[in-house]
Image: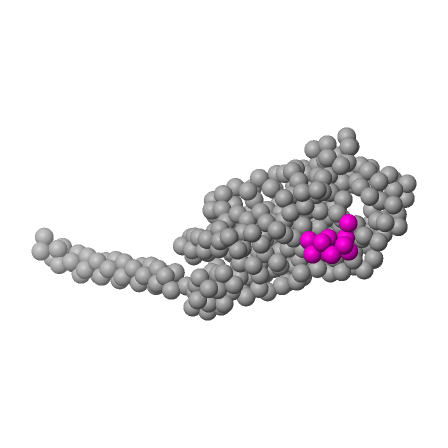
Amino acid sequence: MTSISHSIAPRSRTRRLALAATAAATLALLGGTAHAQATWPTKPVRIVVPFAAGGTTDILARAVAPELSKAFGQQFIVDNRAGAGGNVGAEIVARSPNDGYTLLMGTVGTHGINRALYPKLPFDPIKDFAPVTLVAAVPNVMEMNAEKAKALNIRNVQDFIKYAKANPGKLNMASSGSGTSIHLAGELFKSMTGTFMTHIPYKGSGPALLDLVGGNAEVMFDNLPSSMAQIKGGKLTPLAVTSAQRSPALPDVPTVEEAGGPSLKGYEASSWFGLLAPAGTSPEIVNRIQQEVAKSLGTPAIKEKMLAQGAIPSGNSPADFTKLIASEHVKWAKVVKESGAKVD
């Protein structure tokens, strides 16, 4: 009996020492993770905008970045990475470390439409991201180059439909890129009215608007904030907003459904923009960012500025934003299928 107990004792001590070492290592790792989360950020944070400067995605990112910089004591830097309807920038973030130092200003295009429109995405909009918060919901505006609208005697949506049917292919429709809400809003309009316009995709609303104002395109279904200055300046003529209700920013402009008659009954194609992090980002970091965004969007100065541009600020929870993204996949898959939209 004595010899047996002596042979077991060393192995028991070895096992206890191994378990203790494992526990110590685990506690050290957890402690280090907790410390990293508590001290984050210790360096600048990048917000990737998957479109060119000047569009609504860029405008909203640059509205929240300074507020986050003040709140966290580190610079939040906007980085424009345009291409493939937002897919280039979205892939960059999906492949980035999940340490809280790279965020995406995602859109209804990158996280609601593109999965149904592109045959093969280089990322999974659900599995590869951790939703942080919805920044704003935005109606699109159906607008024309003011000079061309006057020359073609197009004063409203009905005039537009009549001209487009009589002149198929003579109207160029600019967009911020294939698969964006701007593109799909136009495709939905075309399918419901039986009209044809030539789609010209750009790498963002900024360059698309330049060509629209310059007369190289006749029509665009742009996000309202990026077009507001040109509308107020008389360079663009708004025919209708694409939301279910009129926009407080343009109260005299009807909805597409109001102005379009029976063929456009039920038409609705609004946009949204929100912050996302790479999948696996610490929930603590995600929640801290969401809380500061919600706080900044609730301040009178920012809230009034956004509303004046046609954007409705949000700042909702990560859970609610996740639910929105899931529902948008279902909605836009149906729109893509029914409209016959394709990637140019």
Nearest the eye: 211 or 255: 255
Does residue 336 lie above or below 209 as drawn?
Answer: above
Please give the range of residues in magenta: 228-237
The residue at the far top in this view is: 262
Q: Is residue 231 magenta?
A: yes
Q: Is residue 117 above or below residue 51?
A: above
Name the colouring of the figure: one colour
Residue 87 picture location, percent across and down = 64, 55
- In the displayed structure image, the side of residue 324 where residue 164 appears, left or right: right
Q: Could you tell me which residue is drawn at 84 percent across and 44 percent down? A: 154
Q: Is 144 in front, or is 4? A: 144
- In the rendered structure, the answer to whether residue 298 lies left or right of residue 85 reads left
Instruction: State which quadrant residue 28 falls in.
Output: bottom left
Residue at 61%, 51% in the rendered image: 308
In this view of the protein, can residue 186 be seen by the observer? Answer: no
In the displayed orientation, state which residue is furthest to the left: 2
The spot of residue 120 in percent (x, y) is 66, 50
Q: Is residue 50 left or right of residue 342?
A: left
Kindly give the residue lying farthest to the right in the view shown.
Answer: 166
Between residue 176 and residue 329, name the one nearer to us.
176
Does residue 157 lie above or below 66 as drawn? above
The question of residue 84 being in magenta is answered with: no
Most foreground residue, 126 or 25: 126
Q: Quadrant of residue 214?
A: bottom right
Say if residue 314 shows up in the picture. Answer: yes
Q: Position of residue 110 (x, y in %)?
A: 62, 51
Q: Answer left or right for 153 relative to 46.
A: right
Residue at the (39%, 60%) spot, across then down = 37
Number of marks in the rendered image: 0
Residue at coordinates 62% horizontally, 63% vertically from top-left?
80
